[in-house]
Image (tube, rainbow, N blue to C red):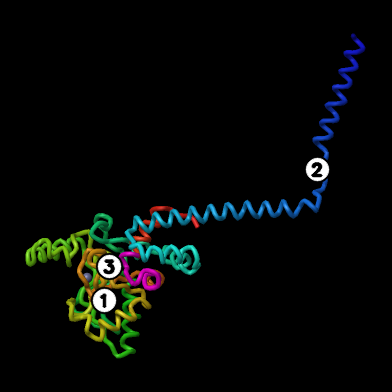
Amino acid sequence: MKLSKQFFSILLIIATAGLLAACLKPAPPKNPVNAAPELADAIAQLSDSQENNDSEFKDLLGDVLITAGIPHELSQKLEAAATENPAFLLELLASLEGDPYLRMLVDKQHSLPSGYKPDDLVELKGGSYQIRNGGLMLRRAAAEALEEMAAAAKADGVTLIASSSYRSYDYQVEVYGRVVKDMGQAAADRESARPGHSQHQTGLVVDFGSIDDSFAETAAGRWIEVNGSRFGWSISFPDGYEDVTGYRWESWHYRYVGRDLAAFIATWFEGVQQYALQFIYEWEKAHIDL
Ligand SMILES: [Zn+2]
């Protein structure tokens, strides 16, 4: 028994050593005949996960488009653009860079941060454009973009007139109150923003010329409509979109959104700033990773 016990002990040691040796032995080189199927498997796996990512992306995009209230037909075009045309995502990413106030939704549902006042307002002095009153102010970037646009208009023989620009919260209290008194609440809400909800408070907006419908038919009105986006300006309340913007058509009210976003709006959103800003708002909320 004693011998036999020793024998098994030795066998156990040999077996353990053999097992260890087998484990530590480097793996045999892969048979090249098998390499191709392994590679094919890896590619197939990768492509599966790519498709999963794509379908996940499409689902997220679909949700964003619905939440942003983009109409069905435009949504379909945007879905195709986002998944097939790299230019859409590149332009979107460019629009998401830089100053968030350029793309901020400021409308009947979304107000500016309480007490917001831009810290880089400059007084408009005129230049290639005229000013209707003294004391008009814009944020520096918008003032520079206004001068650039006005210089181009002037070169085409058209003079732009800035009639209204930055309005403080307190001033908007007065403006809105006056309009309500003149026209009544319902009519006032079609064309005057409640305090905190006016794009004018961003310091990025100019009302041009006569500030009434006749502006659309002037040389300046026609010129900005065609050329404004090249200089980063976008009409906020276009004709026929009152149910989308909440405001009646204002041919004279342009918001400086920067050249990237202005191009994005013009190219993909049929020139409707409200759709593009709603889309960007929901896109940023969804935290989509590309
Ligand atoms: Zn305005």
Q: Secondary structure at mark 3?
A: loop
Nearer to us in this view, 29 or 136 = 29
Q: Earlier in the sequence, mark 3 or mark 1?
A: 1
Q: Earlier in the sequence, mark 1 or mark 2?
A: 2
The label shown at residue 124 is 1
Neighbour tally class for label 2: few under 14, some 14-19, many 20 plus, Cα within 10 Å: few
| Residue 1 higher or lower than 84, as above or below | above
Residue 54 relative to residue 155: left or right: right
Name the quarter where the N terminus is drawn: top right
Does residue 217 belong to the magenta stretch? Answer: no
- As measured in the structure, the alpha-carbon distance from the residue carrying label 1 to the one carrying label 2 is 77 Å
Of marks 3 and 1, the one in the foreground = 3
Residue under numbered circle 3: 203
Neighbour tally class for label 1: few under 14, some 14-19, many 20 plus, Cα within 10 Å: many
In the rendered image, the residue lying farthest to the right is 3
Rendered residue at 8%/66% (across/down): 183
Decide if ligand 1 comes within 8 Å of the CB at mark 2. Answer: no
- As measured in the structure, the alpha-carbon distance from the residue carrying label 2 to the one carrying label 3 is 69 Å
The percent position of residue 251, horizontal first and vertical second, equals 23, 76
Q: What's drawn in magenta, residue-wise?
A: 263-275
Nearer to us in this view, 216 or 102 = 216
| Residue 22 higher or lower than 10, as above or below | below
Of marks 2 and 3, the one in the foreground = 2
Residue under numbered circle 2: 27
- As measured in the structure, the alpha-carbon distance from the residue carrying label 3 to the one carrying label 1 is 12 Å
Q: Amino acid at mark 2?
A: Ala
